[in-house]
Image: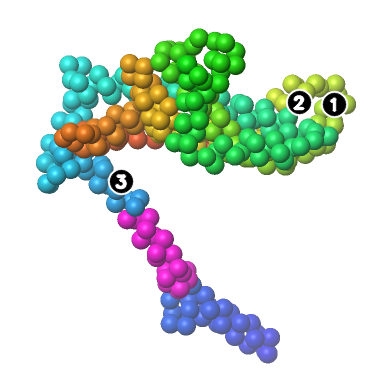
Amino acid sequence: MSNTASMTSIQTGARHEASGKKGRPLGQKSFWHALPYIAPHMLVFAVFGIIPIFFGIYLAFTRWNLVGSPKWVGLSNFKLIFDPSSYFYSIFWRDLWHTVLFVVISVPLTIIVPLLLAVILQKKGLHGVGLFQAIFYVPGLISVAAGALVWRLVFNSQFGLLNTTFRWDINWLGKQPWAWIALFVMCLWGGIGGNLIIYRSALSGVDKDLYEAASMDGAGSVRQFFAITLPAIRLPLFYTTIMTTSGAFNVWGQPQMLTGGGPAYTTQVTLMDIRNLAFPSGPSAAGMASAMALLLGIILMVISLVQIFYMNKED
């Protein structure tokens, strides 16, 4: 009898604890307790994240020169972008192609090179691993403007480090394909460190017994890399692929600072058009710039969803 009363008392107390002193659910009570702590962050995120996104989407359907009130024009901006006789059609699709070219080449480079370096640094008995890792990581901490200034000196056609050292006569930043090569070198230099740290962390978690068993079965280093290493770190690989792709589509600083979009606009990317339209030296076309930004965002969102779909499929 006493046990039954105790159990009833415990169950009643648990229900009261779960529902709170005033009968509110525990989850609701926890939310109100946490609100003072998360509210400042939510406010900052809303002001600098959510509101600009919706305002940018609204501007895509307006004509606005940053002065006065935006004028609603519906789909007119998008019609101009898809009209072959329009100036905006020529610059958007030309520079979107340049952006895609940059993504197709730079993303594999900033995935494969750091991965191979991480595998090499993971080898047993290698001295100075921390030093090499720091050397590869430091460029990622340098601003794009400072890095571009250094690389402009390296690629200078008259007194640059490469031409004077190897006695070459290459106009690196003034002719193609040298301008693209210089741009990819600079992006690879600045993008190795972040992915290298992620891959090294992932590789440290791979079971070493798998490699010993594979060696006993006669598997070489290449076979072990494809049969053990890649499957074991596939999630970090997918993560870095998605993040690197997103960053590559949003490239602006490197071509702006290194080549200025030249020669003859051959390295000009979409974000440079968006910036030039929104903040030109003359009248602004902020509505058209927002329309281009919205289209670029949709393309990037579709590509990211495809990558996430395949990542979940692999799981």
Q: Judge from the rendering whether residue 136 lies leftward or rightward of residue 283; answer left or right.
A: right
Q: Residues within 10 Å of mark 1 (few under 14, many from 20)?
A: some
- For label 2, the SS is helix
Q: Which residue is mark 2?
A: 224
Residue 202: x and y in percent read 67, 40
- Which percent across, then down, holds residue 3? 68, 86
**Quadrant hosting residue 31:** bottom left
Amino acid at pointer 1: Ser
x and y percent of residue 197 in the render?
64, 40
Question: Alpha carbon of mark 3 to alpha carbon of mark 2: how far?
Answer: 46 Å
Question: With respect to residue 38, does 137 lie above or below?
Answer: above
Q: Nearer the viewer, residue 302 or 48?
A: 48
In this picture, residue 249 sits left or right of residue 142: left
Q: Residue at x 55, y 82 (%)?
A: 12
Q: Which residue is mark 1?
A: 215
- At 81% from the left and 22% from the top, the residue drawn is 219
**Element at badge 3?**
helix
Instruction: Provide the major secondary structure of the magenta segment.
Output: helix
Q: x, y (%) of residue 124?
A: 82, 34
Q: Earlier in the sequence, mark 1 or mark 2?
A: 1
User: Residue placed at 27% from the left, 22% from the top?
Assistant: 91
Instruction: Identify the amino acid type marked 2.
Output: Gln
Residue type marked 3: Ile
Q: Earlier in the sequence, mark 3 or mark 2?
A: 3
Q: Are marks 3 and 2 in contact (CB under 8 Å)?
A: no
Q: Which residues are magenta?
A: 27-47
Q: Is residue 163 left or right of residue 255?
A: right
Q: What is the number of the mark on residue 53?
A: 3
